[in-house]
Amino acid sequence: MTRDNEPAIEVEVVEIDGAAPPPKPVAGAMRDPDGDDESGGRQKWTNWQGWPGQVRTLHPLWWPLLIVAGGAVLALVLTIGVLAVLLLLAYRIVRGVLRALFE
């Protein structure tokens, strides 16, 4: 640790185990890992704008699973809808019969 009265020591690494370190990025080309860095001219939006295009690059083995799962979800939603309509219809019929009998 440095004290307040001592200057910080800066060191440049030239070589480690026979391999040179990766080059330093240019100050204007540095980007935020989230992709929302607005400094340095043009802005790179690839993190979220590429999502719709990734469907086209989906591995072909996933498509049968997606189709089967989508069909199962559709069948489940339609079944719940039909049951809800049948329950509502039965309720109205019973209510109508009871009104007719007791009025």
Image (cartoon, rainbow, N blue to C red):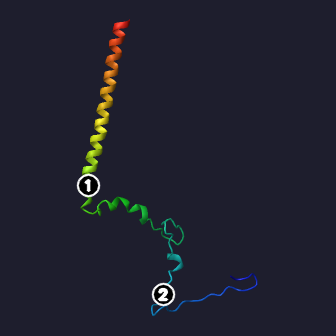
- Mark 1 — residue? 65
Identify the residue at image location x=54%, y=70%.
Answer: 39
- Say which quarter of the image contains residue 47: bottom left
Instruction: Give above or below for 85 relative to 36.
Output: above
Badge 2 marks a residue whose secondary structure is loop
Identify the residue at image location x=30%, y=45%.
Answer: 73
Instruction: Give above or below for 29 relative to 99.
Output: below
Single out the residue that lies furthest toward the right: 5
Amino acid tagged 1: Leu
The answer to the question of whether label 1 and label 2 lie on touching residues, with beta carbons closer than 8 A, is no
Is 38 positioned to the left or the right of 77 in the image?
A: right
Q: Which mark is residue 35?
A: none
Q: Cα distance, mark 1 to mark 2?
A: 45 Å
Could you say where residue 41 lies in the image, as x and y percent from the top left? 51, 71
- Mark 2 — residue? 21
Is 98 positioned to the left or the right of 19 in the image?
A: left
- State which mark lies toward you, 1 or 2: 1
Amino acid tagged 2: Pro
From the image, which quarter does the N terminus lie in?
A: bottom right
Depth check, front residue: 42 or 72? 72
From the image, which quarter does the C terminus lie in?
A: top left
Q: How many labels, in total?
A: 2
Single out the residue that lies furthest toward the bottom: 18
Depth check, front residue: 89 or 43? 89
Instruction: Give above or below for 67 relative to 6.
Output: above
Identify the residue at image location x=33%, y=17%.
Answer: 94
Could you say where residue 42 lies in the image, as x and y percent from the top left? 48, 70
Badge 1 marks a residue whose secondary structure is helix
Q: Residues within 10 Å of mark 1 (few under 14, many from 20)?
A: few
Is 7 positioned to the left or the right of 83 in the image?
A: right
- Labels 1 and 2: the sequence-earlier one: 2
